[in-house]
Each structure stands twice: as C-alpha cells, then as structure tokens.
Amino acid sequence: MALDHAKLAKELLEKVGGPENISSVTNCMTRLRFVLKDESIADIEEVESLEGVLRVIKKGGQYQVVIGNEVSKVYRELAKLGDFSESEPKEKSKSGSEEQENVLSRLFGFIAGCMTPLLPAMLGSGMIKVVLTLLTTFSLIDTSGTTYQILNVIGDAFFYFLPVMLAYTTAKKLDASAPLAMVIAAVLLHPDLTALLGEGNVSYFGLPVTSATYSSSVLPVLLIVPIMKYVEDFADRVSPDVVKAFLKPLIVVFVTAPIALVIVGPIGAIMGQYLAAGINFLYNEMGWLTIMLLSALMPFIVMTGMHYALIPIALSGLSSFGFDAILIITMFCSNLAQGGATMAVAYRAKKLKVKSQATAAGISAIVAGVTEPAMYGITLKYKTPMIAAVAGAGAAGLYAGITGLVAYTMGGSPSALSLIQMIGGESFTNLINGVIALVISLLVSFSLSYVLFKPEQKGEQVKKQEEKLAESV
C-alpha cells in the first residue's frame, strides 16, 4: 500500500507540537531533521507509531524522524503546511530532561547539519566522475579531446568550489548572512590570491599570510563562518540604521577576510593536512583493523545520523591522495551486509508482510545503499539479523583492509553500484578486490542471518497459547 505523504506530514506536524514548536526542519536522504523549541512536547512513541515512520532519534540537538526513501516527498508536503527555516534557532531547544549534550555530540551534529544539504550536488558531481571513469576505462572517449575536458570540469566543479557552497549551508545553519560567508570563501579561492600565495613571502598589513591550498577544503570554512557570525552581530549593533545597509557588510568583510587569511584559514588547512596524515597512518599501519572495526560499527554510527559528519574525512583523502580508503569502503561493506542479512529474513519469513518488507528493504540497501528501512524495519527489530550484518560487514572490512581496497571517486550512498568507483589504478586488481569484498559481505551476512533468524510459526504460537491456557485451568 502506497504511503500517503500528505497525511504523514500532517500527522507529524501535529505530533511534534505544531508549527509554533518548530525552529527549523531539513531533510537528508532518509530523515527529517527537526530542531524543536521544546522536545518534551513531541512524544517519541506516538511519532514512531505513525505509518511510514521507522524510528525517532534525538541527536546533535536534532529530533530526527527516520522515514526512508520517500522522505523528500514527505518533506515537500510538510513544507506546504508552514514556512520552516533551515537555520539554527537563536535559543537552545528544551528537552524533557533538560540535559545538555556533550561538546563532541554537538560538534558532530553541527558538521552533519552543514554537510547534509550539499549531498545532492556532491552525489551528482561524484557520479559524473564515475561516468567519466567508465568512458575512459573502456576507451569510449578521447582523453585529449575537449569533451573529456568539459566532463572533467563538470565533475570537478563542485569539489573545487566546495568551500563557497559549504559557506552557504554553514551560514544558513548559524542564521548568518549566506552571501557574506560565500564572499569570504571566494576570497580564499580567488586565482590571483592562489598565484600570490604560490610565490611565498605574502603579508597583509604586516601580518604574514601562510601559503595554503583551499580548493576542496572543508575545515577552514567550518572554522571561519562561526567567527564571521560574531563579527556580523557586532557590526549590526554598532552600525547606525541610516548607513547600516553598506557599513555592516563592509565591517564584516573587512574584519573577517584577514582573520581567514592570517589565522583561521591556515589553521584549518594545517588541521586538514594532519587529518590526511592520520588517515594515511591508519591506512598504512593498521588498515585491516581500522576498516574491519569501522565496517562492523557503521550501522550504529548511521543510527546516530553522524555518518554525514565523516564526509570531510573522505573528501580529505580524495583531495590529498586521490582515493578514499575509509568512509566509502566501510559503508560499502556495512550497507551490503545489512542487505544480505535482510534478504535472508525475506527468504525465511513465513508472514507475507514481513517477507515483502524485508525484500524491499534488502534491495534498497544492496542497490541504493539506503539501509534505514533494513535496520529499523528488520535487523534491529529481530536482533539476530543485526548480529549477522555486523559479522558480515566486519569480515568484508577485514578483507578490504588487508588488500588495500579504495574508492577513487565519490558517488551515491555506497552500494553494489559503488564497484564502479573502484575502477582505477594500473590494473583491475582493486575492482576485483571490491567484488570479493561484496561477495564476502553478502554471503557471510546472509548465511548467518539464515541460521540465526527464527521465523514465527503460527502453529507454535497457538500451541504455546493452548499450553498456557491448560496450565491456568
């Protein structure tokens, strides 16, 4: 039965306390992410009881409603019911227990909130790179021709100008001026500045400007926009109303730009270099253990919604080394394992409803890399399939770590189709290892889930009820 998106949106709005209780709401690939003024008004059990809602997660200052593949349609219906902002509320929302989240949780929530709106552009550009890889691998396009060069530009554009787009989403989240934030990011990418920094010995009013490359970077923008927000608030207070229209933005740009160039930008670039070095160390020294553990733990990271906060790690690896060996690979192993374990439930289930739900969720995880329906509808619900999925992901991750499996481009949510992203290098060895990891993940998770999962038998249930009735007489 098709999900009634308008009905679900209306019921959700009512259950979370109505438009007046919503500070902001956005959506990612599978979730509606509410920031509520008072979380105690929204009853988790009531929201989870709605048809179409898989689970509710409170994390990173957000009230996350997991819906699955149809979340964008529900979001569109929800947007018709009210004018909801995408920025952070100026006042912190109240929780029922009034507990303050720890700093790390809020940090990951902030990063995830800034990166999530960029996913469509990121995935679209990544898939262009995948198509380009296929065209060149099978000699369907001349790498010296202009068609190749234009396709390469189309695929690279998002990643090169990522700081500008990230400045926009970060400013929206902080309720700061998005255009001004984009100007600051554009300054870091200006070709004249890039050429100047390449010459060395650059100063600004006597202050040294450290040479750094900001294209495809993430950390400098995540650091500078919050500072710009404070400068903007200060400029708003001190600027007389009669000249505020031009004086406020002048102060913001004039003050923030040198802070970005002299202090924050270089710090962010250096932090990015250390992050890349840390990734390289883990990959070279303990790759098998790192990939195995992250693959096994990935379902629980996804449950918190913090997997989006790991995207900067993948971008750092792609920018520094030309490949990612951490995030894409571990999610590849984990997503396939969720699909394999769920398909075993579909095969063994006796109830038609469970069989149908498991089949759809399994295909979604294997083909599209969307695992929430599988996790919340099947593996977590029946527990033993989750054990099988974790084991399958760990086994595949172990093999991937030992063989040095990598992904050369960004694409959609890691799935069986991500094998295309593993084409690269001097031979097809990496692709072959990807196929083997896929087989291990699916085979181990399916086999263990098939053995561990015990489908409900109507006859057994009736027999137990009769035995209890007989004992009570």
Image (spheres, grey):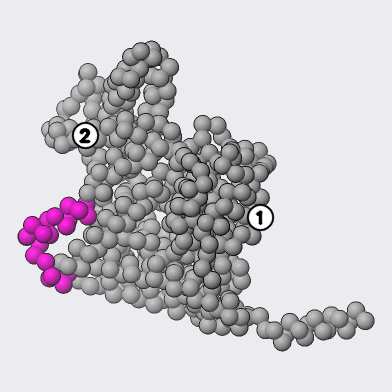
Name the residue that disc number 1 marks: 46
Q: Quadrant of residue 455?
A: bottom right
Residue type highlighted by circle 1: Glu
Q: Earlier in the sequence, mark 1 or mark 2?
A: 1
Residue sitting at x 57%, y 52%: 10
Q: Is residue 147 magenta?
A: yes
Badge 2 crowding class, 10 Å Cα cut-off, few under 14, some 14 to 19, many 20 or more, is many
Task: Give the left or right position of residue 450, taking residue 120 as reference.
Answer: right
Q: How many numbered marks, from 0 up?
A: 2
Placement of 323 over or under 236, stated as above or below: below
Q: Which residue is pictured at 43% across the width and 17% down the height?
A: 237
Q: Quadrant of the C terminus?
A: bottom right
Residue type (three-letter) at the residue carrying disc 2: Ser
Question: Visible in this render: residue 381?
Answer: yes
**Taking the image as drawn, is residue 198 in sight?**
no
Query: Would residue 227 appear left or right of 137 to someone viewing this image?
Result: right
Q: x and y percent of residue 142 in the render? A: 8, 65
The numbered mark at residue 366 is: none
Q: How far apart are labels 1 and 2 at the CA level?
A: 54 Å
- What predominant SS class does the magenta segment belong to? helix
Quadrant in the rendering for residue 401 = bottom left
User: CB of mark 1 within 8 Å of CB of mark 2?
Assistant: no
What segment is highlighted magenta in the picture? 137-156
Q: Nearer the viewer, residue 285 or 242?
A: 242
Instruction: Say which mark, if any, is on residue 211.
Output: 2
Seen from the viewer's position, the closer of residues 254 and 193 is 254
Q: Position of residue 60 (x, y in %)?
A: 52, 44
Q: Residue drawn 36% across and 71% down?
A: 416
Q: Position of residue 447 (x, y in %)?
A: 50, 81
Q: Position of residue 27 (x, y in %)?
A: 46, 51
